[in-house]
Structure formats: C-alpha cells, structure tokens
Amino acid sequence: MPTRLGLLMLLFVQAVVVAAQEPVAWLTQATGEVTVQRAGTDAWALADAVALHVGDAVRTGRLSRATVVLANAERVQLGSSDTYAVGVPTDDRASDVGGTVASLARSAWNRAVGRSDATATGAARPATSTVPAVLERPRFGYVLDPTPTIRWLPAQPDSVAGQPVAYRVRVTHDRGAEPCFDGPVSDDVVWTHTTTANRLAYPDSEPPLDPGGDYYVEVHALDAEGTAPSDDVWDCFTVATDSTRTMLTALHRSLGEQYPPHTETSRDEADAAVPDATADLLYAAVLFDLEFYADALAVLDAIEAAQPGLASVRRLRTYVYEEAGPPGLVDALLDEARAASDAPE
C-alpha cells in the first residue's frame, strides 16, 4: 500500500495541530438554499462542501438544511431558517472515533472537497476518436473488492468502422518487477469475456483476483466480424490486501457510528426528510486520498442515488476524475465546480 496509508494510520493516534490559517470546519452537506458569509464581509453567497474558518457563518433558508463537521469531530446540523457562526475550535474529542474523524478532516476531506482550485493533474490519458473505448473504472490505483466491476465509455463509431457490436474485456496478471510499466502480455491472461453493454460485473464463473496482486484490464471494441480493428484501451490496478480491506471496512463502520445515516426532519413540517451522508462523504474522501478511485466513485454513486444533486458529491467526483480520469468526464464537472467556487461572496 502507499506510504500515505501508514501516515494516515499514524494520524489516528496523534493530536492534530491546527494552524490559524487552516479551516476549522467543513460544510459537508447542503439541501435547498444554504449560504456562507466569510469573516469580515457582509455578503452571503450560495455554497456547499466548502472549508470554513473562524468568523465565517452558515445560514439556511426556509425548507433548507445543512451539516457542518467541526475539526474536533463534532457535527452541527442546521434545520430550516438556521444560522451558525464558526468559533474558535477546542481540543475536546468526542471519542476515539471523533479523533479519527478530525484527523481525516484535516487531510483527505480538506484536500478533496475543501479546496477551491480545480487543476487537473494530467494523470489520465486523453480520449481521442482513434480510441475504441475509454476505460472509466478501475483505472490505476487500488481496488478493495477482488471481484471489481469494470466500466468504460462507449467507443467512437469512426474508430471501429461503424457502431461497435460488442466489447471484449480481458484481465491480465501483471507479474513484472515494476507494475503497470510494460503493458499487458497475452501469455498471462486471467480471463476474457464479451458483452454488448459498456460495463461488466465481475463474472461469477471466474475466481476472485489475488489480494495484493497487480492486474491489467483491457477493453476491445469489436466490429460485426468480431475483430478489434483499432488499438485496445487498457489500464492497471492493484487489489487491496486482506489487512487493508479489513482496516478500511472498520473505518467505514466507525464513521457510520459517529455519523449515523439516520433520517431527520426539519422543524418545518412541509420539509422532506433527508438522510445524513456525512459518514459516506468522509469515507469517499479517504478512499480518494488512498488512491482507491473506483471505490470512491462507487460510494459517491450510492450517495447520488439517495440524494441527487449534492454539490459535495459533484466536487469530489470531479477531483477523482481529475486524478484518475478519464478526462472525457471531467470537463462538465469542472465547469460546475468552477462556477460554484467563483460565485461572489
């Protein structure tokens, strides 16, 4: 696993040093009209999933709500027509889990969601009309499940002499000294399957991939003759070890206990009840920070299904696609993120 994982585990048992210029709270969830007033200003601006500093204030309109996570792991829930002023943080810890959440907030959450800049890392390979399909997940990085679902964007018709009839998906074991360096080799294929869809659930007939193993995944767009006339698209990933999977599963459970996904109703009877997604948002940010890109996207998919339109989900998804690709999914999300971050305060 990456060195960052060890550093993150150390944060679980160490106190967090909060610098004056760093955020002390995060607006993780907003529904309806939620505005933020920055310290020293009079203007209120619409915002969601932003870092908050001492002196900032959050205000909800009628039929609106928001959740603020503080640096000491406490959570402040605002109902309809509420206002919350961010004060000086304390060193109190609600529990051991609270300290963990505070550490996560200082690293993954702030890095992934609290930042306002939107600059692509250039890690993803560009998508062009000559590519038969664009792999979405899993791309490089790690996966928790040894039976991952594979997804890709449809091929461009002009790259396969007409609309592709089917896709051939192949998983290859990477046994090289430097994973993801040489590319797939045809003599170490784990399995191959064909489908007419642009996603493939891990076949039940195939054994799970090896924990800690490195793998390539290839997608070939096939024409009516069953051939792939263009170059294939591929990427590589590493399956998490059993110990890492156990650790992250326990962390997710702990986050759920600290921030239970119960449903709360606003004081306004006309307001609809909305589940609290704070635990899952934090968990998705941790997965992103540790390069579990496909798993972070899966968590965000689940949140989006329950609560469509959350800006916090959109922004975190943008950062995942920025870092892991494919770039074809970044542009629209980046435009939305920039529009939100450029809104006048």
Image (cartoon, rainbow, N blue to C red):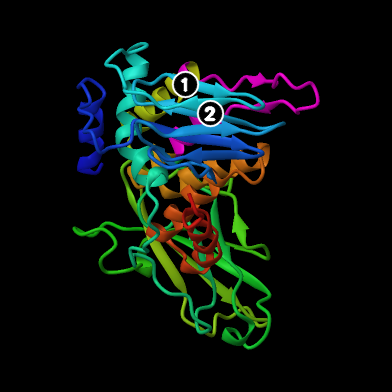
Question: How many residues crowd around disc 1 within 10 Å: few (fewer than 14), some, or many (20 or more)?
Answer: some
Task: Assess whether residue 268 is covered by the magenta stretch.
Answer: yes
Residue 189 appears in view: no
Report x, y in % for residue 232.
47, 75
Q: Residue at x 49, y 63 (%)?
A: 330
Horizontal side of 36 relative to 101 (left or right) equals: right
Report x, y in % for residue 317.
49, 51
Three-letter code for the amino acid on which mark 1 is drawn: Arg
Query: Which corner quadrant holds the N terminus?
Result: top left
Query: Which picture quadrant has residue 30?
Result: top right
Horizontal side of 127 relative to 174 (left or right) equals: right
Judging by the rendered image, the residue that carries numbered circle 1 is 75
The circle drawn on residue 67 is 2
Q: Is residue 109 above or below residue 77?
A: below
Report x, y in % for residue 170.
48, 63
The residue most toward the right is 270
Callout 1–callout 2 Cβ contact below 8 Å: yes
Horizontal side of 274 relative to 323 (left or right) equals: right
Magenta residues (range): 258-284
Q: Secondary structure at mark 2?
A: strand
Three-letter code for the amino acid on which mark 2 is drawn: Thr
Query: Which picture quadrant has residue 190?
Result: bottom left
- Badge 1 or badge 2: first in the primary sequence: 2
Q: Residue at x 45, y 26 (%)?
A: 85
Question: How many residues crowd around disc 2 within 10 Å: few (fewer than 14), some, or many (20 or more)?
Answer: many
Give 163 or 185, whichever is nearer the viewer.
163
Q: Residue at x 67, y 36 (%)?
A: 306
